[in-house]
Image: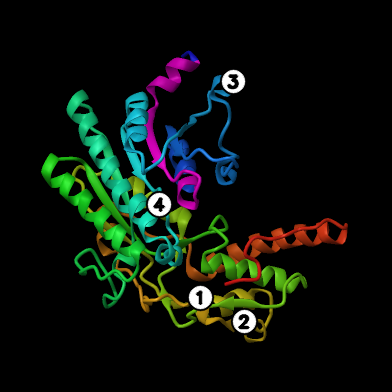
């Protein structure tokens, strides 16, 4: 079979947020499943493709099944252009301004990308299906932050009670998805994912701040880590496990919404203690609480009940809490060793977010 024919016959998927943690793991997963993946990225003066550089090759010379397109969730016309060019079987909307604390500082931008961005994608898919007759299966990335102050454990029937502009925007995106599913018979699913982490997590998120700091402190590159609410409890899983659940949702006969979680909650304090324990250090000697990192409205306790996903999709997490912490600490210890080597050789290295929390 000729290369062009091979690429043409592959199942196609569009992924927004492809350069993020989840986007990179999902892209790996889909490529392993034989998909041609089309990622939508924003035009910027700096490249932000670190997480997918190992996957991206020039398709015209290698035939690699990953193609990147410029677009933006706040520009629905760009989404429509990519839909028309690709004609995908599946669309995964992972793109968002996803940092909860930043959402308090940039609420309008957060709502534009998260809520209105999802609406724009849904409307583009609806219009495309109406004009072509081709069904596109749609996945909307929800968040446990939608539950906010709701009592744990939280499941698909738990009323939403968001406590941040990010959570509110995700609730709107969730109901837009339900509405388009019911109004226009779209195959549209919401995945309500609880916290999922990995070595690819952004360094401004608390788990990655902790593991980066632990590694740097152990090598004398840093003295202190400043954090906010140590008593907040979260249900932490591995992002690489969770992308499988996204895909499974779109393989069902009927679209539904699913909570994806481990069913196990740990406090930030427990995560910190576990991370420092990995390198035989006393966390209390290195961690200080800084009130600046508290949210205006806190989310105290998130713990998911993923019974429906387990029963309907056959999904369950493979990586447990202790293994996740170990994975992240070991990864960041290697980064810290590289940094120390460069510093010892006289190079100036400025790690991102190393001294904050």
Can residue 27 be seen here?
yes
Q: What residue did someone put label 2 on?
A: 287
Position of 35 with respect to 150 (left or right) is right
Q: Residues within 10 Å of mark 3 (few under 14, many from 20)?
A: few
Does residue 259 lie above or below 268 as drawn? above
Which percent across, then down, holds residue 36?
43, 30
Q: Looking at the image, is mark 3 or mark 2 earlier in the sequence?
A: 3
Q: Residues under labels 1 and 4: Cα distance? A: 21 Å
Q: Nearer the viewer, residue 118 or 265?
A: 118
Q: Looking at the image, is mark 3 or mark 1 earlier in the sequence?
A: 3
Q: Looking at the image, is mark 4 or mark 2 earlier in the sequence?
A: 4
Q: What residue did someone put label 3 on?
A: 61
Q: Residues under labels 3 and 4: Cα distance? A: 32 Å
Task: From the image, state whether disc 1 or disc 2 is nearer to you.
Answer: 1
Q: What residue did someone put label 1 on?
A: 293
Task: From the image, state whether disc 3 or disc 1 is nearer to you.
Answer: 1
Look at the numbered disc 4 and give the secondary structure of its residue: loop
In which quarter of the view is residue 180 placed? top left
Q: Residue furthest bottom?
A: 284
Q: Looking at the image, is mark 3 or mark 4 earlier in the sequence?
A: 3
Q: Specify whether residue 299 is painted magenta.
A: no
């Amino acid at each position: 079979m000729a290369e062009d024919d091979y690429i043409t016959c592959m199942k196609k998927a569009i992924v927004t947020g492809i350069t993020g943690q989840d986007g990179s793991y999902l892209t790996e997963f889909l490529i392993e499943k034989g998909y041609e993946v089309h990622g939508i990225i924003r035009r910027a003066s700096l490249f932000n493709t670190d997480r997918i550089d190992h996957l991206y090759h020039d398709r015209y010379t290698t035939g690699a099944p990953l193609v990147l397109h410029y677009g933006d969730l706040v520009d629905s016309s760009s989404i429509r252009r990519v839909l028309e060019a690709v004609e995908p079987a599946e669309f995964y909307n992972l793109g968002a301004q996803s940092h909860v604390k930043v959402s308090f500082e940039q609420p309008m931008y957060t709502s534009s990308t998260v809520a209105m961005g999802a609406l724009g994608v849904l409307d583009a898919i609806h219009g495309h299906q109406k004009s072509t007759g081709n069904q596109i299966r749609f996945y909307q990335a929800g968040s446990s932050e939608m539950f906010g102050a709701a009592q744990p454990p939280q499941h698909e029937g738990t009323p939403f009670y968001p406590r941040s502009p990010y959570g509110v925007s995700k609730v709107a995106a969730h109901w837009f998805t339900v509405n388009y599913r019911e109004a226009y018979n779209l195959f549209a699913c919401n995945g309500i994912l609880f916290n999922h982490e990995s070595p690819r997590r952004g360094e401004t998120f608390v788990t990655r701040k902790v593991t980066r700091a632990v590694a740097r402190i152990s090598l004398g590159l840093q003295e202190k880590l400043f954090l906010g609410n140590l008593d907040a409890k979260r249900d932490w899983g591995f992002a690489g496990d969770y992308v499988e659940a996204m895909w499974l949702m779109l393989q069902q006969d009927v679209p539904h919404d699913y909570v994806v979680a481990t069913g196990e909650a740990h406090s930030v304090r427990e995560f910190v203690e576990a991370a420092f324990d990995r390198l035989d250090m006393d966390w209390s000697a290195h961690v200080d609480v800084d009130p600046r990192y508290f949210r205006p409205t806190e989310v105290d306790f998130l713990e998911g009940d993923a019974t429906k996903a387990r029963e309907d999709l056959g999904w369950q997490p493979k990586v447990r809490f202790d293994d996740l912490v170990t994975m992240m600490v070991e990864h960041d210890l290697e980064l810290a060793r590289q940094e120390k080597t460069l510093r010892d050789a006289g190079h100036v290295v400025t790690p991102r977010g190393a001294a904050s929390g």
